[in-house]
Amino acid sequence: MKTPRHFILIKLMLLSCTPFASQNGFAEDAGWSVVPYVGSSQIGDQSGVIGRAQDISDGPLDVQLDDGFVAGLGLRYDYKNSPWSAEFSWEYRSNDSSTTASDGTELPGGNYASNIFAINGRYAFSRKGAVTPWLGSGLMYVQEIDLDSENVDGERSFSSSGAIGLQFMAGIDYSLSSRFYLSSELRYSSITGIDLDEEGGVGRIANLDYQPLTLGVGVGFRF
């Protein structure tokens, strides 16, 4: 269920930043910037347990997930004469899903989606020309995670909110001008043991994980 490629990709990104490291490195452009971004969302297939749902027998549940997309908006503050910056961000992601219960009942045409807010800290390494590598980590708050399906009978949704998780990031900023820059990143997020309650019903899907890997790119604007 957990794919080792997540950790392999993160390790490769971290290693790629090492040659730029410097104890005296700091962000040269202090102040606020806003960064809208888009990217690819990857998440491993999931297994949980469903109970009390109408027309579905209690028992194991398999959730097959495809690659998806993510869109977000970050608000960053780079501290003057310091390698540190803070980031406040929002993102929405969705991965198409196909869900099957142990009795063969299917929840087709679905998606595993989330609406998340986060606060992160970032450390920038020494700039080399226009390139600034950085590392980051932080906390994320789940406004909503849901597993939806839709067929001729309509939509069926299981959802949860209020969970707290962790994020780890590595990325590179490329300066275009004094105000604009490109920002690319690899971001790993993790929330485990989620319970999703059926909207408009009494069913519940228990013990799901939400551990997406994001490869994103955005354009930053300093103001």
Image (cartoon, rainbow, N blue to C red):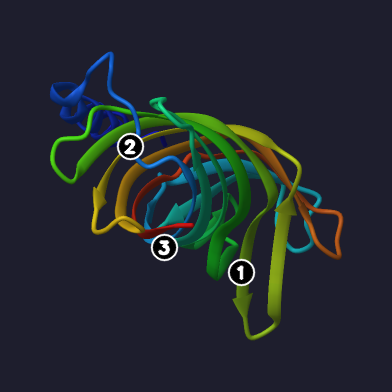
At horizontal 42% and vertical 30% (from top left) the residue drawn is 136
Q: Earlier in the sequence, mark 2 or mark 3?
A: 2
Q: As shown in the figure, which amino acid type bears the numbered disc 3?
A: Phe
Q: Which residue is mark 3?
A: 69
Q: As shown in the figure, which amino acid type bears the numbered disc 2?
A: Glu
Q: Nearer the viewer, mark 2 or mark 3?
A: 2
The image shows residue 22 at horizontal and vertical percentages of: 23, 18
Q: CA distance from mark 2 to mark 1?
A: 48 Å
**Disc 1 element:** strand
User: Residue 171, relative to residue 114: is it above or below?
Assistant: above
Q: Which residue is mark 1?
A: 149
- The answer to which of 69 and 54 lies nearer the viewer is 69
The image shows residue 186 at horizontal and vertical percentages of: 33, 42
Q: Quadrant of the N terminus?
A: top left
Q: CA distance from mark 1 to mark 3?
A: 18 Å
Q: Which residue is mark 2?
A: 28
Q: Earlier in the sequence, mark 1 or mark 3?
A: 3
- The answer to which of 17 and 45 lies nearer the viewer is 17
Q: As shown in the figure, which amino acid type bears the numbered disc 1?
A: Ser
- The answer to which of 112 and 126 lies nearer the viewer is 126
**Disc 2 element:** loop
